[in-house]
Amino acid sequence: MNLETKQCQNCKQNFVIEPEDFDFYKKINVPPPTWCPECRLQRRIVWRNIRSLNKIKCSAPGHQEDIISLYTSNNNAPVYCQDYWWSDNWNPIDYGRSYDFSLSFFAQFASLASVVPRPNITNKNAVNSEYAVGINIKNCYLVSSALDCENCSFSQSIYKSKDCLDSYNLQESELCYECINCTKSSRLSFCYNSHNCLDSSFLSNCRNCRNCFGCVNLRNKQYYIFNEQYTKDRYKKEILKINSGNYSGLQDAKLNFKKVVLNNIHKYANLLKCQNVIGDYVENSKNSQFCFDSHNLENSKFINWSHRGGSSNYDLTVSGSHELSYDGSAVGSGYNVLFSILADDDSEIQNSYFCLSSSHLFGCIGLRNKQYCILNKQYTKEEYEELVPKIIKHMNDMPYIDSKGRVYKYGEFFPPELSPFAYNETIAQEYFPLTKEEAISQGYRWKDPEERSYEIEVMSNELPDHMKDVTDDIVGKVIECKNSSDARQKGRGRSPDQDASRCTEAFKIIEPELQFYRRMNLPLPRLCPNCRHYQRLKQRNPLKLWHRKCQCGGTKSSNGIYINTIQHQHGDTPCPNEFETSYSPERPEIVYCEQCYNQEVV
């Protein structure tokens, strides 16, 4: 089939469906999408809440204790504590119902979703980690998407790490603070896109470095400060002058580091051991396009946050090893999983939610180890195979129409208005930020800040400037978030940034956190955990690509800021290479193609 341009049903912008896309849709027997790739991603992640926690009552029979939950108390469906939900004391099959051809499929699914219990939080093998979302975690606090971690706090997307705070996308590391996209490192702070590094601060795109400060694009270096070589003794003396335990000095270091970063070159994309791949932060992959933060992909497209990869998949967000799966969110390993959420070890399932170790399901919720079920009702294999085609035809004949007039026939992911979460509770707010008015106008729900009964005990500007002056009694005190105090001093209510980040306006220091700051000689934070999280997100590029040319102008960058250290293959003339990059054209970073970057750095 030839290339086709379609208008997105949601944003009304045109998008292109390539011939190979049609081949994929034909292979899994689904119609082509009616939403553009970006809107499809936004639609999926509006179902993904991993950071907004609430205290509610457990709905399980005989269990009225308070539990920490991803769902609010006014959520339509019952919410069970982890122990009860995973037990044999209830059976989701008991909620099954026959398919009603007088109602649209998604209306029936919404009705089922309002009665089937769901677990309060997506934790597995979690020890002393009540306020965390992850698997195989111990002594973790306010972490999300964590795997095999211990003693970590205030972090997201961390794997096999220990004793780390305030980090994002951190792997196989320990004693790291405010690190983003770093792996196999130890004793780092304020480092970005750096790997196999040790005892360093303020690094960007460095590899195999130790005892470095404020450096960019270094390889196998030691005792460098702002990209200048020092002797061991002089390095130690200069680092003592910087004194990272001092808050005001740390702010100066941040500004100086930003200048160093902007004066150096950036590789157009972070692709490692990849062949014919378009995207960013992708490793060990081939023949995959528009993919981000993923590993081990093959013949796939529009994949985000897939660490185990897979072959021949489209539109997966947070996924394990898959094959021939499409339009899913938080799906573990599986085969031919379509339009589903929170599915793991599944095959041949469609439009289902939180179903595990199952196959041949359609429109089911909360099932485990089941086969041939529709709307949680058990069927024989023959009955199932006879009924599913009739339901698909009915979905096309009687589509669901949401409050904004968007039409959902067979082949569409769940309508956003059926999500159990408000827009600003989900990671959609992190990657597609909206104001309250924008969210409501687009058909999303919004959660206003809750009234909190507390008294500020310490203003952020009253915190000691140096860690050595912090006393133990700071633990447990209510500290005003700096963003809140800044807004108050300007004579206004909550700022738009506070609403976007769901600023809590106040926070507390916990005992393990204080000990970590002392061990790492770091000052106390001035922002609440939510505001700190959104500050980290600003350090990452968006999940979007722009077509650009290499900015190598021959002997120097096209803007004249960076002077090349070696003659490149194209000589004194501008580099002709073009590429897809997550750096938008208006950004100040100097972006080089892989060939020019490697000649300067590797």
Image (cartoon, rainbow, N blue to C red):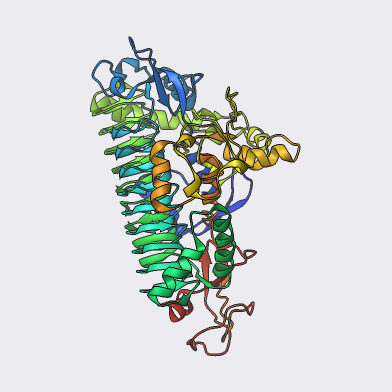
Which residue is found at the position 39% from the left and 43% from the top?
515
- Kindly identify the residue that appears in the image at 72 percent across and 39 percent down: 489
Q: Is residue 203 above or below residue 436?
A: below
* x 60%, y 41%: residue: 462
Residue 225 in the image: x percent, y percent? 47, 71
Asked if 377 appears above or below 219 in the picture, the reply is: above
Determine if residue 467 is in view: yes
Q: Nearer the viewer, residue 145 or 410?
A: 145
Q: Would you place residue 357 above or below residue 263 in this image?
A: above
Question: In this view, which residue lies farthest toward the right?
Answer: 491
Residue 312 appears in the figure: no
- Is residue 144 or residue 475 the one in the foreground? 475
Classify residue 135 by image quadrant.
top left
Residue furthest top in the image: 62
At horizontal 37% and vertical 66% (from top left) the residue drawn is 272
Measuring from the top left, give residue 503's x and y in whole percent: 58, 37
Q: How many marks?
A: 0
Image position of 125 (left or right of 575): left
Q: Give the image location of residue 31, x and y in percent.
A: 45, 44
Measured as percent of width and height from the top left, residue 64 is found at 38, 12
Frontmost residue, 336 versus 45: 45
The C terminus lies in quadrant: bottom left
